[in-house]
Amino acid sequence: MKTLIVIPAYNEELTIGSVVALAKKYGDVLVVDDGSYDRTSEIAQKAGAVVIRHKVNMGKGAALKSGFEYALSQDYDIVITIDADGQHNPDEIPLLVDPIIKGEADLVIGSRYLNGSKEKIPLYRRFGLWVLNKSTKVVSGLEVDSQSGFRAMNRKALESINLKSEDYSVETDMVVKAKENGIRIKEVPISVRYDVPIKHKKNPLSHGFSVLASIVSLIGYKRPLLLFGLLSMVSFIVAGVLAYLALEPYYNGGHVYLTQAIGAGIFTIIGIQLFVAGLMLNVLVKMVRE
Ligand SMILES: Nc1nc2c(ncn2[C@@H]2O[C@H](COP(=O)(O)OP(=O)(O)O)[C@@H](O)[C@H]2O)c(=O)[nH]1
Ligand SMILES: [Mg+2]
């Protein structure tokens, strides 16, 4: 089977050489250099990879999209994605490919949660990952290591996962699309290291929040009643608190606090509108699905 290892890379000159060299044992290697301003392209090429270069930085999702298009056009049967920063071990590629060759799965996700690798995840990241995994579950119904970039897929998965995300939310997007298209997903345990020279390309907090924001918008899209229902509940709670603040002095012999009372009214109206919006979008989603 023709195998392509796709490595999205942004300023990874310190690690890209060894990742390419180790990955080469398991197939052809494609590095998508996403507008790096260091020597990522040059080193990847010297190490034996084919390099596609974006002139400007377009994001990890866009890089994977370029990689997948290349794989489809060159008739590859299996595609692996692996990070360029040295966090994943290319020697574990066969573990991910195995369920595909055996015909057990179309998309295999390397998970940090199945063999104690989780212990190595720094605490602040573990919490963020928990939030992202749970919210991915709300959209897809699947509880997986939703942010893992170490994955393998066959041609069927590749053809049906039509990615929309340009940035880091690509990982969740892939899981949701796979689930929608009846792609069989399996997880296998992988190791992961955190002692790499460059820890993250992006501030982990803003990285986490931007992924969360795009998952929340996915939830709005897939399960509007849940999202809008929650928001409307929050509005009603705020309205309740304001109403209490408005009326409490009155019952204690004073007069009604007008500002708080008006606030309570406004939040009640917002709450009702959000709820109605949720109901309507929910009907719309159902109609589109049928
Ligand atoms: N092509 C491309 N790759 C990126 C970009 N940002 C990150 N990557 C790559 O995606 C992988 C994971 O990025 P990283 O910042 O380590 O994410 P983290 O490990 O989840 O914090 C690495 O191989 C990066 O080089 C980007 O804007 N474009
Ligand atoms: Mg990393």
Image (tube, grey):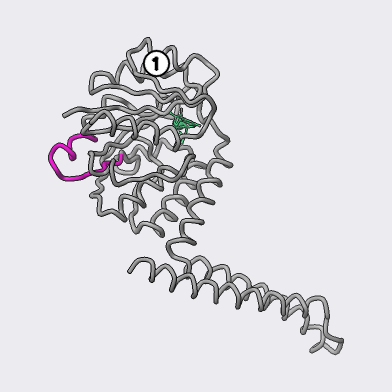
Could you say whether the residue bearing mark 1 is in a helix, strand or loop? Answer: helix
Name, please, the residue furthest toward the left: 102
The relative height of residue 214 versus residue 1 in the rendered view (above or below) is below
The residue drawn where x is 43% and y is 46% is 164
Name, please, the residue furthest toward the top: 46
The residue drawn where x is 46% and y is 50% is 132
Give the quadrant of residue 33. Answer: top left
The answer to whether residue 64 is left or right of residue 214 is left
Dot 1 amino acid type? Ala
The answer to whether residue 94 is left or right of residue 62 is left
Question: Is 103 covered by the magenta stretch?
Answer: yes
Q: Which residues are magenta?
A: 95-109
Name, please, the residue furthest toward the right: 254
The residue drawn where x is 18% and y is 40% is 99
Which residue has dot 1 on it?
44
The residue drawn where x is 32% and y is 13% is 48
Badge 1, how many Cα within 10 Å: few under 14, some, many 20+?
many
Question: Is 69 covered by the magenta stretch?
Answer: no
Q: Position of residue 19 (x, y in %)?
A: 36, 20
Which image quadrant: the N terminus?
Answer: top left
